[in-house]
Structure formats: structure tokens, C-alpha cells
Image (cartoon, coloured by chain):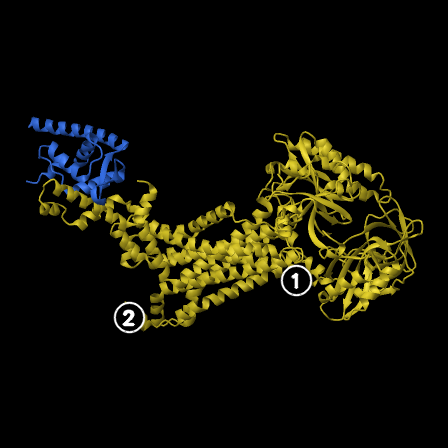
Amino acid sequence: MKKTDAMQGSLDLLILKVLSRQPKLHGYAIMTAIKQTSGDVLNAEVGSLYPALHRMEETGWIRAEWAPKEAGRRTRLYQLTAAGKKQLAAEVARWYTVSSAINRVLQEA
Amino acid sequence: MSLWSRIAYAFRSDRLNREIDEEFAAHMEEAIAAGEDPAEVRRSFGSLLRLREQSREARIAGRLYNLRADLVFGWRQLLKRKITTATAILSLALAIGACTSAFRLIDALFLRPLHVAHADQLNVLVRQGPDDHGVPRSFDDFAYPNFARMRAAAKGQAELIAASFTYRTDLTYATDNEMEKGYVQYVSGTMFPTFALRPTLGRLFTAEDDITPGAHPIAVISYNYWSRRFANDPQVVGRTVRIGGNMFQIIGVGPKSFTGTEPGILTDIFLPAMMDPDVARTDISWVRVLAVIAPGVPHEPLRAKLDAVSLNYETERARGFVGMSRHNIEMSLQKKMVIEPAAAGVSRLQGDYREALVWLGVLVALVLLIACANVANLMTAQAASRAREMALRVSIGAGRSRLMQLVLVQNAMLAFFSAVLGAIFAWWAAPFVVSRINPPDNPAHLILPADWRVLAFGSLLTLAVTLLFGLAPALRASAIQPVIALKGGEEPRTKDRSMYALIAAQVAFCFVVLFFAGLFLVTYRNLSKQRLGFDAQNLLLIETTTPHGQSPEAWSQMADTLRTVPGVKDVAISSWPLLSGGWTGSISVNAAPPTDTWGYFLSISPGWLNTMRIQLIDGRDFNSADTFPGEAIVNQSFVKIFFNGVNPIGRTFEKVNPLGSRQLCRVVGVVSDATYGNLHEPLRPVAYVPFHKINEDGTLNPADGGAFVVRTSGINPISLAATSRRLVAKTNPAYRVNNVRTQQELVDNQSIRERLLALLALFFAIVALLLAAIGLYGVLSYSVLQREREIGIRIAVGARIGSIVRLVTAPIFVTVLIGAAAGIACGITSVRYVQALLFGLEGAAPSMLIVPTLVLFAAALLAAIPAVLRAARIDPSIMLRAD
């Protein structure tokens, strides 16, 4: 079963939330965090994670910096910006509105 | 991400790709290190290339990427049409460069504030009123005692500074035999402190140097002069320089930024006003009065106060003018004081070139508009040929703004290249024009820095030009209707209409430029053909002074010595050369009251009339026994004005001086009229008097200065300059040669402005004509190209060549007619504003309108020929088979 479908449109929210809990994560860490905290239900694919990260960086919600790793290699670490924090709050609020609405619709039936 | 890094990204996409790859590689390592299956991990990245593209799209601003693409595409478009592009760039560059040059000149002469404190509060006092001939004029010269009174009156409200007219004079740091030239200006001691100027070396003048006439023998040299003459030698302070019989000790060097108060002249040496020999004279006006008016002081009451003080001074002085006619005294007192802002300084160059530069600016602006119209038409034609491409872009989803950007970027590139070329042109042209102002031995020194003012002007101009010629094509490109354009049939007429309107405007502007060029050319021709009344060719002028005066014998001995130089035909003496000085007095015949009209005087030696080739009509030349007062030779105008045209030989007149003294002269000869002082003015009534003067007590007054007029036998007179100069010094060391020049130079100097204007106007007229012709040619060729098929069909169905030619040329000639009519109207209405720059012609004369019209039509005909030939040669069988 393809689990990504469940995340359509909410990947941004998940990334922002993960980064709000723990700043300075690289892409793989964000991916595993989403996977683990959701109890293996949600799985962000590489193919959607990185475009989303780069798009959000461009928009100014998150900030990236290169951090040195061993043997002269580098890794790119992401963290929330002030705008990102605001966006997170807005997305969370929207999520609750939408999900409670959906719940209501489901319960009516 | 900052804007800078975005721009960096747009142009360094390789680095971006590497970064994205690096990040992905790090991810895979982490995943593998976390124990995931390497193959699985790699597969999860799928097509790396696609992913990378997606990330890249996100990471660089799309707009910038597009901009770069547009730049590259625009560049290719420009390269594809090399000739069109080169024409457009060259014409725009010329126009932009010319406009920028004009701005540089106007800015340097009139706008750029002096580098002094309170430049914005700096004003100059000017008196406006009738001159000796009743013509309204502005006078900015004052006598020093008058200045002193005004300065006292203005105390507390304004600081008044006296500054003499900077002039070029002989000076020496050693002996008289090593004379050199320098620009000298006498200034108030308060000038330097009021301007808050600091010395580079030593000290500057202070108010203490304004006290006793003749008691402050000190000098301050300018930084510029210090560098040029002394190579920045710090030992210069303490050296002495001799100027006009006085020794001055150099006490300091001025600041680098200060070059004097007269734009166009770099002052070399500043001297205290107290040291001017005329400082106590009430009858000699030699200072300009600069006023630094304290902030908040209203100008009008101050002006009224100064006016009253000055008028009072002049009225007191006029009480002594018993030798002047009532009318002339009243006229001299009619002047009204005006305070004029002078942040940029004041100079004679400003007065001489104000109007000329403004009109030059108008001409170059018109040329710029013509060039813009040209390029707009080229662009429109190009846009039309790209209609399909544009339509395709719209139909595959390009937004209107993207299309506008595409076209605007291309135009901006065009404008940018033009601006760069134009800047190079202006770099060269502005100093070139300045070097043509003033005689070659005394060039104008206008400081023309290429600073932010010029840069800002150039940038604004380029922006305006881009919008002017680029906006219409850009809007048209963006308004394209894909359905119509892709169908291949757009009504061509709508497009043509704006092209024809631009052509009409071009023709009108071109006419105006041609018309003005014609006016300036005829002015110069009239002036240089002006009858002088003497022969200026082959005349060398050696101007000398002898500080203590010399006897008549010494003067004629010197003339005799000069006569022995090989190549010399004739030598004579006058107090100064014609066209270089003036001496006037009222005339009284039969002891009548002094006349309103002034008589003009010149002292000459026997033989001078013949040397100058001035014709003796009646009576005799002077001989060595004649003196002044005593004998006189008058010209025809003098006879007409003062003797009512009756033969004056043997009759007498008196030269009446303002203070009442009279000098009696008996007319011994009548000569033909010759120009006295100014080519632009009508011929004056002149009385020539003997070179030897007698004082009132009958003793001889030895002449202390005069010009030897040397006529050569056909050889270039200036080639004798060095020999004669040496010979004079050797023959009699009491003589000092001030200046050696030719009479022709003096004549030429009087028409320098007219020559410059004619030259530049002619140049711009040719450019304007060329541009307009190119424009016409372009539009005609384009319209033929557009209608090739139509013309082919017409020919196929039997249309004659004549009707084809008419078909092609009729609209363009109607356009040219309309443009020319508009141009004529513009020319006639504006001509009265240039009248002051013209000489010997009526601006609105029909002949001045006919020539430019004919030239314009000839150019239009010439420009039409290629298109007409092309239309006539269309082969219907080929044309109709084409697609």
C-alpha cells in the first residue's frame, strides 16, 4: 500500500513540526523522524521530501546550512526560521479545522 | 536567500547541481549507515536527474533564470541582424553621447557649485540698464570705491567680496627676459575666509590684507598652478614674482578644489585687491561683486539698499561730468541693481555661451529623438517579423509580462551598448568642444569631471531612451493575438500607422535641426565675410610696453629696426591693434555742447593707414610733426555723424572728456570706414590721432606702450614672431614685448562662437539627415516587403510601374510633407529665440526655409529609391509561387 497518499498536502506541516521539535536536522533525519513518530505509518519519499525542503527554503520558512562531517564531507542541516514558526502555527490550526471537519462528516454518516 | 545569492545561483547552476548531489550523497550515506539496504536506498532516489531538476527549480528563482535566458536569446537576436543592430547602436550611441556631452558642458559651466562653503548662498551683483548706445545690457563691473561702500552697507546681512576679472598677463620669477604668462585675479582678503578655504601650504589672505592700497605685496597661488608650474615644490612659499611692475611674495598655496570664481578659467595667482593699480580710481570699473548672503536675509530689501548706495555713488560722480551730454548722464544712471544666484561662479564664458549651449542642447535632444524614432521603427518592423514566434510563445503558455520582458530585455541590451559607446564619445567630445572655445593661445579651461552627476544623467537618459523606443514594441509584442498571428494574416495597416507617425515626427525634428544649422552657418558666413575696411592678412602685431615711456625718436627707431627684417614690407605703430581696445570721448564741433553719440579714437603713427591698407579718401596722412591734440584724420562715418557729411578738411572738432577737459583737433584727412572694435557691431565714427601726445602744459607725453604693426611680403607673419621679439629686446632693453600675434587671429577670435556653433550644428544636421534617411529607407523597405504579394498580384494583372511606384511612395511622401510642414511651423515659431545668436540675417526669411526643405526632400527621394526599385523588380511568377 502506498502510504504517501495519506500525506498529500501535509508534508510541509510534518517537516515544520519535526524541525520545531529538534532544530538542525539533515534530510535523512527528518525522513526517519516522520517515520518513527508516526509509528511507521507515514513515510516521506525522497522524491517529495527534497523538493519540499528546497521549496520551503526558497519561501523562507526554513534555513539550511552546511555542517562538516568526517573525512571532509558535508551535510546540509535544516532549521525553522521565524516565518517558519508562524507558518507552522497556521498549518497546525488549518489541519485541526480540516481534520475535525472531516471527522464530523464521517460521524454524520 | 539573499538576492545576491539568487543572482549567483542563476549564473552558477553547476555549483548548485553539485550542492544538490552532495546533499543526496550525504543522505544515502546516512541511510546506509543506519543499516538500510544500499540498493533500496539508491532506488528510492529514482531518477537522480529528475529529482535534481525539481530541487533546482525550487531553489533558484525562476524569474532570474528566465532573465538570463532572455539575455542570451536577445543577444542572439541582436547578432542575427548585425546591420540593423549596428545601425541602431551607433545612432543611439551618437545621440546619447552628444546629449551627455552637452550636459557635461552645461553642468560644468552653469550648474556645478563651486567647491566653497555656502556655495548655495553665493550671489553676484549685476546692474541692468542701457549701455553707451542705449541697448539694454547687464553690467557686472564696479569701481572699487563703490564696492567698498556697498560692503559697508551690507554688513551683517551679507559678506561682499570683490573679485577682478581674471586676466592673462606677463609675469616673471627672474628677469624681464624670462617672461611667462599667468592668469591673475585680484580678490578681497576676505574671500578665502568667507569661502572657508584652507591653505595647502603657508597661509591665505585675510581681512588684514584689505586695508591699505599698495601695501600688501603678497600672492597666493592656486594648487593647480603649483602643480603645473612648480611640480608641488614646498619651497615655493617665500619666492617672489613680478607682475606689472610690482613684486609680490608668495605666501601660500590654495586648496586643491578651488580654481577661482570663474568657470572656464583656472586662476593661477591671486593678489590682494588692494594691490590693483586702479583700486582708488572712481572712474574705472574692474571688480565683480560676489555676495554671500546670510541665511534668512530677504533679498529684496538688501537689493534695494545696495541699489541706493550704488546709485548714490554714481550720481555723486556724475556731478563732475560736465563734458558729457545730459542724455548720456541720465542714461548712465538708469541702471538697476539685481542680485543673481551664482553658486557655480560667474564668468564671461557663461554670458557668451549661455544661449549657444542651450540651443546646442536642443539640437542634440532633437537628434536623440530622431534616433529613438528610428530604433523604435526598426524594432517594430522586427517585432512584426517575429509575430509568429510571439504568438507561438503565447499559445504554449507564456504570460504577457514574459513577452514584454523578452522584448524589453533585448531593447535594454541595445540601449546599454549604445550608452557605453555614447559614454566613450562624450568622454572625447566634451573636452574637444571646450578646446574649440576661445582663441588657441588662450584656451578655456573648463573642469569636466566624470562623476556621479554625469553618470546619473547618462543612466537616466539611457533609461528614458529605452522606454522611449522600446516600450511601444514591447507593448505590441505582449498584445499579440495568437489566433490572428498564427493564421498569418494581421492587418498590416494598423502597425504601419504608428510607424508613419514616427516618420513624420522624425522629418519634423530633422527639419528643425537643418533649419537651425542653416541659420548658424549663414551667420558664420556673414560674419567672416563682413567687410573689415582693412587688410588683416600678412599683419604681425608686436604689442610692447615701456614702463617709463619712450621718446618719439626711440619709437621710430624701433620701427626702422623692424623694417630691416627680411620679409617685412612695412612697419607702423598704433596705441593698440584694431579689434583689441577702445578709447572714446564726446565730440563737440564749433564749441557746441557734447554730443550724445560717442566718438572713437586710436593713436597712430605716420604710415599706419597705408600699412593697414585703409584708404585715404581726402587730405593727407600724418607726418612726424603732427601731435595730439593738434591734428586728426577721421573716417566717413565720423564725417556723416559729426560734420553732416560736409567735407571737414581744415575744420576742427573737440574731444570732450567726461570731466570737462577738451582737446582740439584739426581734420587733415578723411579715410574709409574700418571696423574698430567688434565685428558684430555697426561701423563706428572713428578719429585717428597722432601717436605723439602733448600734455596740457605743452610738454611731450612719452608713450609707454604701443603695438608695432608689421606687414610682411606674403610670408606667414607668425614665422617672424621669434625674430622680431628678440630684435626688440636687443635694440632697446627698455621695451618689453607683451604679446605677438597676427591681426587675422584677432579677426578670427571674434567669430569663434559662431564658427563653433556652425560647425557643431552642421555636424548634427548631417547626423539628423542621415538618421532620418535611414528611418525612411527602413520603413519603405519594410512596407514593400509586407506588400510583396499584393504588388506581385497587381503586376500580374497588368499594373504599370508608375502606379506601383505611386502605391509604394505615396503614403511616405504624404508623411514627409506633413512632417516638413510641422517642422516649418516649429522653426518659424522658435526662430525669434535664437535671434541674439544670429548675425546679418532675418531668421524667418523664406530663403532660410527653402534650403532645408529641399535638402530634406532630396534625402527622402534618395532614401526611397532602393525600395521603389525593389517593388518595381518584383517578379509575380516567383512571388506568387513563393508559398
User: Amino acid type of disc 1?
Assistant: Arg
The front one of B850 and B402 is: B402
Q: Which mark is residue B525?
A: 1
Q: Chain of mark 2?
A: B
Give me the residue at 18% from left, 45% from top: B24
Residue B220 percent across, percent down from the top left? 68, 43
Mark 1 secondary-structure assignment: helix
Question: Is B32 situated above or below B803?
Answer: above
CB atoms of marks 1 and 2 within 8 Å: no
Number of other residues with Cα within 10 Å of mark 1, as a class: few under 14, some 14 to 19, many 20 or more: some
Question: Hey, what amino acid is under mark 2?
Answer: Arg
Residue B634 occupies which quadrant of the picture? Answer: bottom right
- Residue shown at the point (60%, 50%) measured from the top left: B446
Q: Residue at x 17, y 30 (%)?
A: A95
Q: Of the two numbered discs 1 and 2 on the same chain, state the one appearing first in sequence.
A: 1
Q: Quadrant of residue B334?
A: top right
Vertical arrangement, residue B733 with respect to residue B404, above or below:
below
Viewer-side residue, B135 vs B524: B524
Quadrant that contains the C terminus of chain B: bottom left
**Left or right placement of residue B575 versus residue B89 in this view:** right
Instruction: Give the foreground label among 1 and 2.
Output: 1
Rendered yellow, the chain in question is B
Looking at the image, can residue B825 be seen?
Answer: no
Chain A image colour: blue
Q: Which residue is mark 2?
A: B881
Left or right of A48? Residue B740 is right
**Quadrant in which the N terminus of chain B is drawn:** top left
The residue tagged with tag 2: helix, strand or loop? helix
Using a 10 Å C-alpha cutoff, classify the residue at mark 2 as few (fewer than 14 neighbours), some (14 to 19) or many (20 or more): few
- Residue B266: x, y in percent? 64, 49
